[in-house]
Every structure is written in C-alpha cells, then in structure tokens.
Amino acid sequence: METQNKLYLIPSPLGDNDPAEVLPQPVLDRLQTIRTYVVEELRTVRRFLSRAGLKGRIDGLRFAVLNEHTRPEEVEQLAGLFADGDVGLVSEAGLPAVADPGAQLVALCHRRGIPVVPLVGPSSLMLALMASGLNGQSFAFCGYLPAKTEERRDAIRRLEKTSAALCQTQILIETPYRNDALMADLVKYCADGTQICIAADLTLPDALVRTRTAARWRKDPLPIGKKPCVFLLLAA
C-alpha cells in the first residue's frame, strides 16, 4: 500500500461566496483530512477553511506562507512539511499554481518525487473563455501586461498581431485597481474589428461577461471597477 504523503492542490472560491457553491463535496471532504497547508495569504485561507467546514478547528492546523516574497531557499525548506502528513496548497482564489507563486512548491514536489494531486474547482480563465464566445480551440494565457503605458501599448499590439495570425484568443489578467486603465488601452489600441471580452466577478451573483468589438466598446464603454476580472481578445 502506498504510504507516501502527497501535495493536494486545493481550489478556493473566486469571491466571498459559500465554498459549497463552487467546490465538489469530495474536495470539501479532503479538507477534513489535511492538517498542514501552504498558503499565499493566511487570513484569506483561514476564512475559507472556516466556511468550508473547519470552523473551530483552524488553530489546530499548521500553516506556511508561500508568496511572491518567498526566497528560493525558503521554498526548499517546505519539503520538510511532508514528513508529518499530506500538505494542501491554497492560493488567493481559484486554482493554485496557475499565475500563482504556489507553482514553486509543485515544482519542488516533482524534484523530490512527492506525488501531486490536483483537485477540481473554479478556474476564472477557463470560465471566462467558455463564456466569451471567442475561439476555444486555440488560446493563450498571457498573464499580466506591463504597467507602463508605452510598454503596455506595444504588448497589446503584439498580442493582437499574434491573435490575427493564429486566430488565437489571448487571455489577460490585471490587478483590480488597474482594470479600467487596461480596458481603456485595449479599446484604444486594438483595431475596430477586434473582439474584446471582459469577465468580472465570475461565479458571484453580480457576475458580468460581455464581448464586443473594440469599435463598439468605444461607443458604449462600461466601467469595471476593482472587481476580479479576466480580459480576452480575438483579432478579426
């Protein structure tokens, strides 16, 4: 019988909704068996676990933080956590290790021969692509664009050119307080016929998914605000 301890990649809700609304019961059951967690932000995960059925038991759990400030030698030290049992990896929202520092722990486990088990949960990227009406056969996740205006403008034009050449949907994300600035640049620098989709607050009651051409967005803009949002574009 296999007794080696595993790393479980644990999805979390995309917003402040009930975990049972977006996570399968087997994932919630698995949380009952894990005592050690590697997390991106401790307060967020404590609240998530409490709402997921561990209320009153949080203080008995062990937590280690892995975020953008964690040094490589500190990541290596996380291997010691597996001596005491299975470990759960939880990011800020959605799937861990996707556009997330937790990928470093997954890579460590592969180097050390520690089994990695991904669990089912919400992916804002795939949900946005599903709902966009854009090309789901060929797509690329491009992450964050540069914050500086000129560099971002050039990046948008490169992505649009790639999208046109490959008929490929380009998927972007941004820090929420920059949502409207990114949307303004997408609308400004993309050709009239390029389709742009915004998908904000996915899985929440006020979720918004809207796909229009750049020309249409210019005539009828829609403020996004500081909501978690995914941006997609497909050039004509």
Image (cartoon, helix red, strand yellow):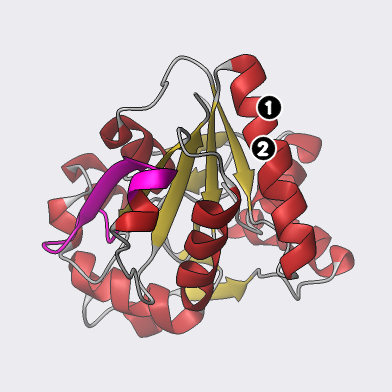
Dot 1 amino acid type: Thr
Percent x, y of residue 139:
53, 25
Mark 2 vs mark 1, CA separation in Å? 5 Å
User: Tag 2, which secondary structure?
Assistant: helix
Q: Which residue is mark 2?
A: 159
- Quadrant in the rendering for residue 32: bottom left
In this rendered view, identify the residue nearer to me: 33 or 53. 53
Q: Please name whichever residue, 133 or 1, is drawn nearer the observer in this view of the structure.
A: 133
* Foreground pick, 96 / 118: 96
Name the spot of residue 203 as percent of width and height, x first. Answer: 21, 53
Write down the region rendered in magenta: 200-216
Residue most toward the right? 73
Left or right for 18, reference 233: left
Instruction: Tell me which residue sits at (73%, 48%) in the image.
Output: 155
Q: Residues within 10 Å of mark 1 (few under 14, many from 20)?
A: some
Residue drawn where x is 45% and y is 70% of the image: 180
Q: Quadrant of residue 213?
A: top left
Does 221 sit above or below residue 124?
Answer: below
Determine which of the numbered discs, if any, sits on residue 162 in the image.
1
Answer whether labels 2 and 1 touch (C-beta < 8 Å). Answer: yes
Residue 156 image point, x, y percent: 66, 47
Helix, strand or loop at mark 1: helix
Please indicate, yes or no, whether residue 163 appears anywhere in the rendered image.
yes
